[in-house]
Image: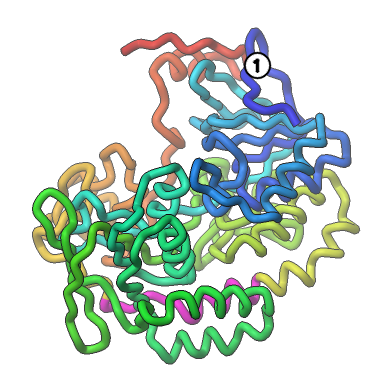
Amino acid sequence: MNTHFAPHNSQIDCDILIIGAGPAGMAAAQAAAPSGQRIVVVDDNFAVGGQIWRDGPNAALPAIAQTYRRVLAQHHNITLLNSTRVVAVNEHRQILLENSEYAWWQNYDRIILCTGSRELLLPFPGWTLPGVTGVGGLQALIKSGVPVDGQRIVIAGSGPLLLAAAATARKAGAQVIRIAEQATAQRLWQFGYSLWRWPSKAIQSVRLGISNITQYRGNSHILNAMGQNQVESVQLKIGSKIEQFDCDRLACGFGLVPNTQLGEVLGCLLKPTSGLSVNRIQETSVPNCFAAGECTGIGGSERALVQGAIAGYAAVGNLNAVQALENKRHRWQDFADCLHKHFTLSDALKTLAQDDTLVCRCEDVPLAALQTCDSWIDAKIHTRCGMGSCQGRVCGAATQFIFDWNAPPARQIISPVRLDSFMGCCLMPHDDNTARPVVDSH
C-alpha cells in the first residue's frame, strides 16, 4: 500500500475511489484489492482508522484495527491519500482533492462513500465554555495526547459512546464523577436484555457497565454548565432531582449524525429516516456509486465493516461474496435498529437552550433570534445561522432536532478550500487533471 501519495505533474486515474478510511473504507479496500484494480483511498486524518480507531500518542488500537492495517499494506494496488480532503465534485466522475501541497481532480470509474458521521451537539446554557466538548471530541483529545490525568470529568448525553468515552478518560487518569444518560432506566434494561442476540456486544456492555456502575445514571441529562473562564461545575437533572457537580471538563453528546453531504452533491437519495439510501449491494441511487458505514445510518463498527466489505465486493463485480455476507449484514442492521429504538432522544432535550443561549456559536445567534423563523433557509437569511466556519455542521443538526426543520441542503463546496486550489483546479476544463502546486496566498 502506498501512503502519503502526492501527485506531481499529472494525476493517475483509478478504478475505485474510496472516500473515508474508517472501518467501512478499510473493509471496502480489503475486499476489492484482490481484483487487482487500481484503488485510491482518501482520508483527512494522518492515519487510517477513522474516529473509532483514531491513532495518536495515547491511542491503543484494537487488534482488529491493526490487522486491517497490515492487510491493506500488503496490497500494492491500493494508494492511500492521508491528510487529504474532498473539496468539490463535478459531473464527469471527478472529485477535487486537496492536501497541504497540491490540489487536483481525481478521476474514478466507481466510488464508495464511507464518510462516517459527526456528533449531535445540542445547545444548553454554558455549552460554549472552554472545557466543554463533545463525547467523541473528548476521546479524540485524549488520544491525541491532551493530558487529563487527575481531572474531574462529567459525561452526559445518550448512547453507548458515553461509556466508551468514560473508559478512555479513566484509562488516561481522569476521574469520571458522573455519566448522565437521557434514556430511561426501563429502556436501558430492555436494551441490555436484548443483547443476548449479539454476544460480543453483551460482553462489552457488561465490562463497561461494571466499571462505571457507580457513576452511571439513566433518565438524566445536562441542564447547564457554569464557570468564569472555563467550565467549573454542571447541573444535571437526574430523575426528578437537580444535582450540581464540580468538574474540570464536561463531555456532552447526543448521538451521531450521518455525513451525507458528499453523497447528496453526487445526487444520491436519502432514506426517510437518516443516511444515504442503498440497495442490497450497497449501491446508492446513482449508478456505480456505493456507500457503506455510518453515512448510511448509525449502526456501529461491526455494521460498517460488513457493509464496507459488501460495497468493495460489489464494486469489483464479486456478487457471490456479496451474497455470502447478507445474513451478517442483516444481523448487525438489527443491532442498529435496536440502538435507535432504545436511545431515541426525549423531547425534553428540545427545551435545554434558553432565549440567550447561542445556537449558532460561529455567528453568535441566540435561540431567541430563531424563534420567529420557520425554516433553516429563513434562519440563515435573517440571522446568518449556519454561515460561520462550521458551515452549519453543528447548528444545522441542532435546529433540525429543536425545531423539526428540514435538514440544511448540501453545499456544492464540500469543505473550505484555498483560493489557489479553487482558481487552479475548479475553473479548468474537466479533461485537464493536472495537479497544481499550492502557492501560499496569505
Tell me, what colour scheme is on the image?
rainbow
Give the x, y percent position of residue 288. Answer: 72, 43
Q: Is residue 270 visible?
A: yes
| Residue drawn at (55%, 54%) of the image | 52
Q: Is residue 226 magenta?
A: no
Residue 175: % across, % down: 34, 65
Q: Is residue 282 left or right of residue 359?
A: right
Q: Which residues are magenta?
A: 333-348
User: Which residue is depicted at the point 59% across and 64% down?
Assistant: 300
Left or right, residue 164 beside residue 14: left
Q: Residue at x 33, y 47 (%)?
A: 392
Of 218 and 372, the residue lying toward us: 218
Residue at 72% in and 72% down: 330
Q: Main secondary structure of the magenta part?
A: helix
Answer above or below: position of 378 versus 440: below
Q: Amino acid at mark 1?
A: Asp
Q: Is residue 119 visible?
A: no
Instruction: Give the residue pinned by disc 1.
Output: 431
Quadrant of image for the C terminus: top left
State which quadrant residue 203 falls in: bottom right
Q: Position of residue 214 (x, y in %)?
A: 38, 81
